[in-house]
Image (cartoon, rainbow, N blue to C red):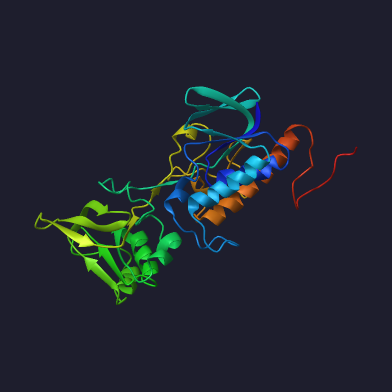
Amino acid sequence: MNDVIIVGAGVAGWTASLYLARRGLKVLVIGKDVGGQANYTDAIENYPGVEEIGGLELSRQIRKQAEKHGVEFLQGEVGALKAGPNCFVTSAYGRQYKSAAVILAYGKTPQDLGIPGEEQFKGRGVSYCATCDAPLFKNKVVAVVGIGDIAADCALLLSKSAKKILVLSKTDKFVAHPQLSKALFKKPNVELVGFAQVQEIYGDQTVKGMKLLNTRTETVSSLAVDGIFVELGYVVNSQMVANIVKLDDRRQVIVNADQQTSVLGIFAAGDCTNRNYKQAVISAGEAATAALACYDWLQQAQGAAGITSDWTQIKRIKN
C-alpha cells in the first residue's frame, strides 16, 4: 500500500514525488518513459536557474533527487485507475497497485504528421515546441507544418531567430486569423510554400530536408531544411480516467487552484490539466502545488484537520 501513486514520469511527476517523499510519504511513480514530452527537447534554456539543459537530463536530475528520498519507480503504462474501498487501485501491465491518493501527471502528446522519418528525428530537428526550441535554430532554415493560428504563432516566434522560415500549405493560401497572417508575411524572412504536403523527413544525425508532394501537380520534390516545426495541436490521452474525473472538451483533466480534480484524493499537474500554458517550469510549479495539497488532504483524511503544508495553516494539533 502506497501513500501516493503518481501517473507520469516527466518533470511534473518527479517534482510531485520529490515534494511528497520529503514529507515522509511512501510514493510510487509509474511512467511509460522517463522525461515524457521533455525528451523531444535537446536544450531547455528558459528553466530558471539553469542556463541550458536537455529535457531528458532535467527529468533525470529531478528523479535522482526524488529517489534519494525514497521514491520508487515502475516503468509501465497505466491501463486503468479505479476507486476501491478506502483506496485507489492503479493497474499497469496486468498488476494492481494500491494508494491512498493519486496524482495524474501523464502530460500531453503532440499530434504527429505520421510520416516516415518523423519518429526517427524527434528532438534532432523535428520539434513540436517553438517556445522551447526556436533559439536552437538561430540563422538556420526551418519549415513550419501546421494549421491556423498555432502555426502562425510558431512561425512568428521563429522569425526572430531563424534565417528563413518556410510556411507550408496544401493550397496556395495560408489560413489563420487575418491580423496574424498579415503580421507573419510582413516578415522578410518568412515565405509561403504553397500546394505542399510533407511525405517524408530525411537526414543523417539531424534533419537535412523533406520530400514534398505538390498537391496541384502530384509531383514529388525535395526541400532542404535544418529543422521542421510541427504545429497540429496536442491531444491528452485521458482514457484511463475518463470515467472517474471530470474532463473538459479537449479531454484535459479539470483542476481547481490546488490542482484537485473532481474526485477527492485525486490531483493532477502539468500538461494533462486544463491550464492554458504548457511549459516545464509551469508543470513543476503545478506539481509542487498538487503535492502539497495532496499531503494536506491525506493529513486531514487521517484526522489531522487543520495541519497544512504552507501559508494556509489554521491550527496545530496539540501534543
Q: Image quarter for residue 222?
A: bottom left
Residue lying at the far right of the rendered structure? 319
Q: Is residue 235 above or below residue 303?
A: below
Q: Is residue 101 above or below residue 214?
A: above
Name the residue at 47% across, 50% down: 38
Name the residue at 28% across, 45% down: 114
Q: Is residue 20 above or below residue 162?
A: above
Q: Is residue 146 visible?
A: no
Q: Position of residue 189 (x, y in %)?
A: 30, 74
Quadrant where the N terminus lies? top right
Nearest the eye: 23 or 246? 23
Residue lying at the far front of the rendered structure? 205
Nearest the eye: 269 or 315? 269
Q: Image quarter for residue 219?
A: bottom left
Q: Image quarter for residue 218?
A: bottom left
Name the residue at 18% across, 56% down: 212
Q: Position of residue 108 (x, y in %)?
A: 45, 46
Q: Is residue 86 left or right of residue 183?
A: right
Q: Is residue 48 left or right of residue 125?
A: right
Q: Is residue 79 visible?
A: yes
Q: Is residue 97 above or below residue 158?
A: above
Q: Position of residue 115 (x, y in %)?
A: 25, 47
Nearest the eye: 242 or 278? 278
Q: Position of residue 185 (x, y in %)?
A: 29, 73
